[in-house]
Amino acid sequence: MVSLDDLEALRKIDEHGMLDFYMRWPEAIREALEMAEALDIPDELRTGEITIRYGRPELLAVAGMGGSIIGGDILSDVLWDELDVPIQVCRGYGLPAWVGPGALVVVVSYSGNTEETLVAFYEALRRGCMVIAITSGGYLAKLCTRTGVPLLSVPGGRATRMSFPYLFFPLLVFLERFELARGLRQRAERTAELLSSMAKELGPERPVEENEAKKLALELVGTVPLVYGFKWLRSVAYRLKTQFNENSKIPSFSNWFPAMNHHEIVGWEAGEAFLKVFSALLLRSRGEPPEIRRRIELTKEMALDKASKILEIWAKGSSKLEEAISALYIGDMVSIYLALTRGVDPYRTKSIEALKAGMAELRVAERVEKAVGELI
Ligand code: F6R
């Protein structure tokens, strides 16, 4: 195992500078907020036969895949008891049938080349939805230029998942700009401040004994992390599962309270020998409702005690937004340290690239480009 305090060794393995970029997340958040405020969104867009009128939407749909769309889930969880319109997260080819002209559809693909997301873009345009795209380039940028759809152009050249600040924080600004929510910009700025102090506490220079993320990574070595969240930390648990997959290159799964008490808990009857391979990583909040706290404590005693260990990440901050993003930030850092201590480059995701290359022969992106051309 690589020592997590050997900075030279860490930098060598982390050749794309993931750790360093995480130290710059607070700046990236501020930059993303400014970019989203400055984006020119017209009152009306006429393109070919299509007319789109941008006004207060009846619902927000966020379309994308993988690291590009997780922000949609987190947004929906964090604002669950605050918004008076639904947030629909759309993964896969296209959009649900009931997404129509009253919907604001934010299409997010960091590369701009994800075929499922391109189909969703086409569908949103065809149905006359209020479309906005977030991308660093690719087909999606090209299609926006061609159609006039507002495009938030984010800095490219990184992995999607590390570019989370650019893909998530603009959604908060759009909610305010479309008069669906208030005070989000302020909460986002406080989140950036919180992350500035966390970056110092979790960064590579901080030695293991004083560094929560390094400590947790070392605890997780050799186990399959099962990550549990609840309410505003629900999708953060899923995010961490995907980060253990993509950064650490290990299997990992997630679930949430109270849902896991209605099915997964029974799987924990399987017996200790069987369950030892798992570690349980619980996302906790000082503001968790009493019924959730009770469920977590009972589940630890009755089920999770059979895991090789039970670990916890306590969210920081005073708003749900700060709590969600702080837990995500710690967890992301844990997944990177876990990769590095195993001598694994956290950046590369060979299997995703190979799968996408295998799909390319169906030429979905090219077909979407042609179909959009026929629409306008
Ligand atoms: C890569 C990653 C993946 C991609 C997904 C969609 O860092 O996290 O989950 O996000 O394959 O690709 P994009 O984000 O380019 O639309």
Image (tube, grey):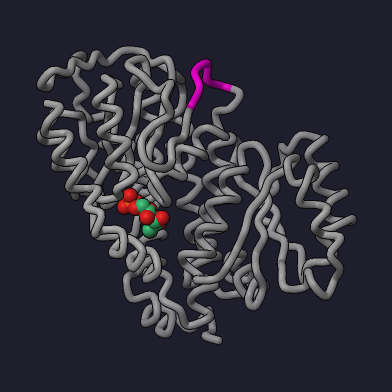
Please count the marks in the image.
Answer: 0
Task: Tell me if residue 373 is in the magenta stretch.
Answer: no
Q: Main secondary structure of the magenta part?
A: loop
| Residue 337 showing in the rendered view | no
Q: Residue furthest front?
A: 362
Q: Position of residue 220 (x, y in %)?
A: 65, 71
Asked where in the image residue 93 lies, by quadrant, the reply is top left
Asked where in the image residue 192 lies, by quadrant, the reply is top left
Side (left or right) of 309 relative to 318: right
Q: Position of residue 57 (x, y in %)?
A: 38, 16
Quadrant (top left, top right, bottom left, bottom right) of the C terminus:
top left
Residue at the image point whose x is 46% and y is 35% from the top: 89
Q: Nearer the viewer, residue 59 or 314?
A: 59
Residue at the image point whose x is 62% and y is 43% from the top: 234
Q: Nearer the viewer, residue 43 or 125?
A: 125
Q: Position of residue 163 (x, y in %)?
A: 35, 52
Looking at the image, residue 65 lies above or below residue 125: below
Side (left or right) of 242 relative to 279: left
Quadrant (top left, top right, bottom left, bottom right) of the N terminus:
bottom right
Looking at the image, residue 220 lies above or below residue 289: below
Q: Position of residue 145 (x, y in %)?
A: 11, 36
Q: For ligand 1, which image quadrant applies?
A: bottom left
Looking at the image, residue 104 lies above or below residue 244: above
Q: Nearer the viewer, residue 352 or 136?
A: 352
Side (left or right) of 62 relative to 49: right
Task: Tell me if residue 85 is in the magenta stretch.
Answer: yes
| Residue 231 showing in the rendered view | yes
Residue at the image point whose x is 24% and y is 13% from the top: 53
The span picked out in magenta is 82-87
